[in-house]
Amino acid sequence: MPRETGKKLIAQNKKARYDYSIEDVYEAGIVLTGTEVKSLRQGRASLVDGFAQCENGGVWLRQIHIPEYSMGTWTNHEPRRARKLLLKKDEIKRIEQATRDTGVTLIPLSLYFKDGYAKVEIAVARGRKSYDKRQAIAERDSKRETQRLVGRRAKGVE
């Protein structure tokens, strides 16, 4: 059977970019069991409550919900278990230093298969206050409006 190529998105945390200001983004592999992989291949996962922590010289992903595989038996996994992330040592050191500050956390942005391997995109993020969120919405709306005007002017419509 030929090896899988390309990128297949499984789950995405869209609210994370709204609730947090993203500082750094890392791609990490995940240590999974067989039934977890089969459940992910069916496109079933949720990143909503997920976060990552640095402990014992490694990074662990917590509260990610991967539902049990329907065809699994006694080998099925626990849906919200802690999963180890596979990162290089220098990346782990950078993440540990960044998360020492107060108000900084590690959050998963997306979960996907890349060339047959399960990967997660994690971000070092700082929580936003409600006024920061309103400001981000206003900036996004103003950018959209300027792009709309530039497009109309390029077409010759005023």
Image (spheres, rainbow, N blue to C red):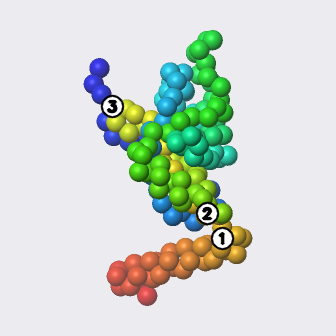
**Are discs 1 and 3 less than 8 Å apart at CB?**
no
Residue at the spot 55% in from the left edge and 73% down from the top edge = 140
CA distance separating discs 1 and 2? 21 Å
Q: Residue reaching furthest left?
A: 2
Label 2 element class: loop
In the figure, residue 55 lies in which quadrant? top right
The percent coordinates of residue 21 (x first, y second) are: 57, 65
What's under tag 2, amino acid-wise?
A: Asp
Q: Earlier in the sequence, mark 2 or mark 3?
A: 3
Residue at the spot 66% in from the left edge and 33% down from the top edge = 80
Q: Which residue is mark 3?
A: 4
Q: Earlier in the sequence, mark 1 or mark 2?
A: 2
Which numbered dot is residue 101? 2
The percent coordinates of residue 87 (x first, y second) are: 44, 43
Indicate which label's residue lies in the foreground, 1 or 2: 2
Q: Residue reaching furthest bottom?
A: 158
Q: Residue reaching furthest front?
A: 56
What's under tag 3, amino acid-wise?
A: Glu
Label 1 element class: helix
Near-viewer residue (156 or 95): 95
Label 3 element class: loop
What's under tag 1, amino acid-wise?
A: Lys
Q: Which residue is mark 1?
A: 133
The percent coordinates of residue 153 (x first, y second) are: 38, 85
State which quarter of the image contains the C terminus.
bottom left
Residue at the spot 48% in from the left edge and 43% down from the top edge = 120
In the figure, residue 47 lies in which quadrant? top right
Up-down relation of residue 139 to residue 51 (above or below): below
CA distance separating discs 2 and 3? 40 Å
